[in-house]
Amino acid sequence: MSRDVDAPAAAHVRQDVSTVMVVGAGLMGSGIAQVAAQAGLDVVLVDDDVEALDRAAARIADSLARFVRSGSLTDDEASRARGLIVTETDLRAGGSSADLVIEAIVEKLEPKQRLFAELDAMCAPDVVLATNTSQFQIGRVAANCDRPDRVIGMHWSNPPQLMKLVELVVGPDTSSEAVAGAIRFLDGVDRRHVLCLKDVPGFISNRMSTALFMEGVRLVDEGIATAEDVDLVARLMFGHKMGPLETLDLAGLDTALLVSTALADFYGGDRFTPPDLLERHVAAGRTGRKSGSGFYEGLS
Ligand SMILES: CCCCCCCCCCCCCC(=O)CC(=O)SCCNC(=O)CCNC(=O)[C@H](O)C(C)(C)COP(=O)(O)OP(=O)(O)OC[C@H]1O[C@@H](n2cnc3c(N)ncnc32)[C@H](O)[C@@H]1OP(=O)(O)O
Ligand SMILES: NC(=O)C1=CN([C@@H]2O[C@H](COP(=O)(O)OP(=O)(O)OC[C@H]3O[C@@H](n4cnc5c(N)ncnc54)[C@H](O)[C@@H]3O)[C@@H](O)[C@H]2O)C=CC1
């Protein structure tokens, strides 16, 4: 097939990944780093908070130990995976060696935009920069990059170690080579993918999930049902693995509030407006499992 002589050639995209840099070592970044290491990749896990890196190392060790206990991994495989992950506070430690970057920092647009500008300046030009944002449009995350064609949404599900599907989000400028590179990486770490073909806030999964999350919280807030009963309906009437309120406790109520607020700002109306109860929990520091309490007490 001949190419239009006036059309710019698509930028080359690195397709083979042996080193991945994961930025943000919270719930998601630590899990994604572990998945990559279990697949035999070198991982540089970066966080600007050294205590977050310590917590990430403990979470990874705990998760690998669970896999060993259940017989899914041998001791040797677990220690090999642990040995492939290097933790760093300095972005530059991974910037020059990474074949792929996955960003998993806090769900706020400005820090993500600043980080993507930094990554753009330090990573090799053919490297794909992926964002694990739960809902921001990819075009906005890439706004300060000179390589918007090599920026993609790679939205993992929590806990990444166990969930087998990842949502790829195609930004307005994302090239088909970048999509191919991301798919090749996901195939290599044993994850299936779906494609969100338009750059809409919330993508496929969180446009769907918010409906259940929102209504679940409102039912409790309005005194119509207990959290336990809302979750039981989801588990036993709908056959879900977890109910909406226990899932929110797993995901983090602070992150859910950021997601919900950003979606409400974009779409307007009541559809995504955070319920009062969610705001009250977060204001009181009840952020779910990460703080030990949320819709349920004594979580870990
Ligand atoms: C109020 C309105 C707000 C609106 C907010 C807007 C939207 C909300 C945004 C929320 C924030 C953003 C979220 C996001 O972007 C997308 C998401 O990720 S949403 C969350 C998606 N995830 C789920 O829905 C999880 C559903 N649950 C499950 O699939 C299962 O319950 C789960 C796999 C988590 C656990 O399995 P289960 O059988 O239920 O539980 P067990 O505890 O018995 O575990 C089974 C087995 O697995 C082992 N295990 C558990 N965790 C780990 C781990 N991290 N690593 C390794 N192994 C693990 C466990 O030890 C058990 O092993 P056995 O050998 O069987 O004992
Ligand atoms: N929690 C969930 O269930 C899911 C979350 N996500 C998305 O993944 C991203 C991360 O979420 P979580 O891991 O839950 O958050 P988290 O709060 O557990 O971790 C975020 C980490 O990013 C670090 N960080 C913040 N700014 C940084 C910067 N500029 N440089 C380096 N590190 C920085 C923080 O120190 C923290 O350790 C968010 O965009 C979120 O929306 C996506 C899927 C599921």
Image (tube, rainbow, N blue to C red):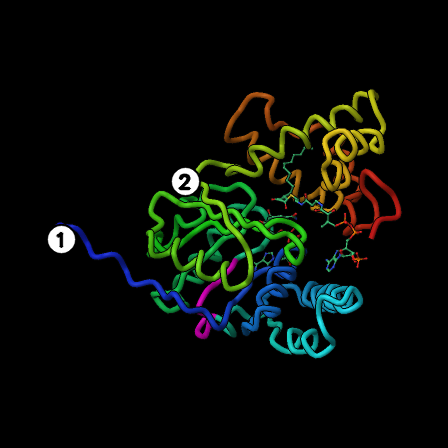
| Left or right, residue 191 beside residue 177 | right
Q: Earlier in the sequence, mark 2 or mark 1?
A: 1
Residue 94 showing in the rendered view: yes
Answer above or below: position of 103 versus 171.
below
Left or right? Give the position of 128 relative to 133: left
Q: Position of residue 46 (x, y in %)?
A: 58, 66
| Callout 1 secondary element | loop
Circle 2 residue: 197
Q: Nearer the viewer, residue 66 or 299?
A: 66
Query: Which residue is found at the position 41% from the left and 38% from the top?
Result: 198
| On screen, residue 267 above or below 298 | above
> Do the residues under discs 2 and 1 have CB atoms within 8 angstroms?
no
Query: What is the C-alpha distance between the residues marked 2 and 1?
Result: 26 Å
The amino acid type of the residue labelled 1 equals Ser
Q: Position of residue 81 (x, y in %)?
A: 64, 73
Tell me where the magenta segment starts and ends, as one range: 95-102
Give the x, y percent position of residue 203.
Answer: 50, 38
Q: Which residue is mark 1?
A: 2
Depth check, front residue: 144 or 6: 6
The amino acid type of the residue labelled 2 equals: Leu
Q: Residue furthest left?
A: 5
Q: Residue at x 66, y 40 (%)?
A: 256
* Number of dots carrying numbers: 2
